[in-house]
Amino acid sequence: MAVEILPLGKVDVEPGTPVKKMKAVVIRPDRLGEPIKAMKIEEIDVPKPGPGQVLVLVKAAGVNFNGVWASLGKPVNIMKYTGYDFHIGGSDASGIVWEVGPGVKNCKVGDEVVLHCNQSCGQCPECNGFDPMACKNQRIWAYETNWGSFAQFCLVQAQQVLPKPKHLSWVEAASYGLTYFTAYRMLVRRARIKPGEVVLIWGAAGGLGIFAVQICKLVGAIPVCVVSSPSKAEILRELGAELFINRSEFDIAPKNGVIDSKTFEEIKRFGNKIRELTGGRDPDIVFEHVGYETFPTSVYVCDRFGRIVICGATTGYNLLFDVRYLWMRQKEIIGSHFANAYDAWEANELIIQKKIKPIVSQVFEFEETPLAHQLMYENKHFGKMVIKVQIQDANE
């Protein structure tokens, strides 16, 4: 028998029981702006899975910067992109398979799962032999598509489903997908990281950086961790990092769209600091996601034949750099965008094997989802934030 709605925070029916309504954190076109105002809890219909789709009861949901972008409607109003008149974000989740659509064979009702956030058509030549990330219909779930994890139920493609590591709590399991799988593809697949290489990691104490550091240590590379304060280095020391640069000690950001002589001197001083730490070596790989404020430095400090791999630009996507340091020293700029299902599966196996561990910094109640995103918008967060949905205790 169908139930009207589940109580928030707990599950009092068996998996597979039909549920009509759900609570969701919703963004509407008429209230785009800062997350604290754009995101509101509403009660809406539970979506029905179609062919190849899976409905998942959300136990916990991870917070990512794309929720901030969706709230702001910048750089695009995502609802014009998806075709819906509302948006439910949340691109990380742990939960229980609740219903499967026709043709789904890789999971069943009751399975405990985590989700990756790449959606593709599954039918084009790129999806079947090349790389689903090259699919012309490739989208990031819950940003470029709807029905994300800031709700009691979310709707995904079957290929997004991965087994939940048994040793992790629901909160821990919800924390790593987007950032870890992105970092894995950036370093392992795209930048082709090798043992002994020096890797400069911007934002090393953030959601991406924490996993980049662990990947470096796992493969035997040498992470140089850029942090904004000494206190943010402590968690990285526990992960085995030894080399740190305090970004606040260097005035390297372009001024008014120009790299002036004073800024360039600061960039060179930053490069000297790297060599001081590494015994004279320049980075073989630069792990980039900051964009405008750091990219001129990334190109300059990267070693000859080195690789700058970038997955985003949180400080702006119109980038400046002196191209002479690129072509004359034969460096590469490599774009990377999340991960495909195989990348995600490989990376998830390292979590299951306890070789990589998620780090959760803050846990919020479902009603505090707008607040968590506001903290991210104001850069007042640390590490990974997670929202409790259908759990009451963060240790469940």
Image: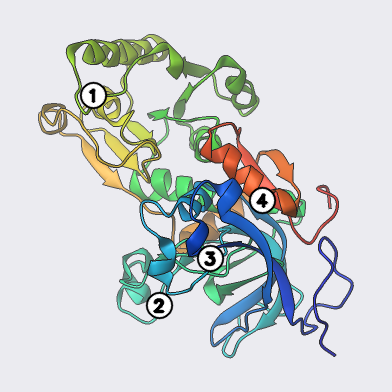
Cα–Cα gap, marks 2 and 3: 21 Å
Q: Nearer the viewer, mark 2 or mark 3?
A: 3
Residue 203 in the image, given as x and y percentages of width and height = 47, 30
Name the secondary structure under disc 4: helix
Q: In which quadrant of the rendered view does residue 362 lie? A: top right
Instruction: Say which label, 1 or 4, has the lower sequence index.
Output: 1
**Amino acid at circle 3:** His
Crowding at label 2, few (<14), some or many (≥20) Cα neighbours within 10 Å? Answer: some
- The residue where tag 2 is placed is 121
Q: Look at 30% across and 42% down and name the residue there.
A: 317
Q: Mark 4 and mark 3 in contact (Cβ < 8 Å)? A: no
Labelled disc at residue 369: 4
Disc 2 is placed on an element classified as loop
Q: Report the amino acid beneath label 4.
A: Thr
The residue identified by callout 3 is: 87
Residue 300 - label: 1
Q: Earlier in the sequence, mark 4 or mark 2?
A: 2
Which SS class for mark 1?
helix
Circle 4 or circle 2, nearest the eye: 4
Mark closer to the observer (1, 3):
3
Quadrant in the rendering for residue 363: top right
Q: Identify the residue at image location x=63%, y=84%.
A: 48
Mark toward the start of the polypeptide (3 vs 4): 3
Going by the image, does 122 lie left or right of 328?
right
Q: Is residue 308 at least partly visible in the picture?
A: yes
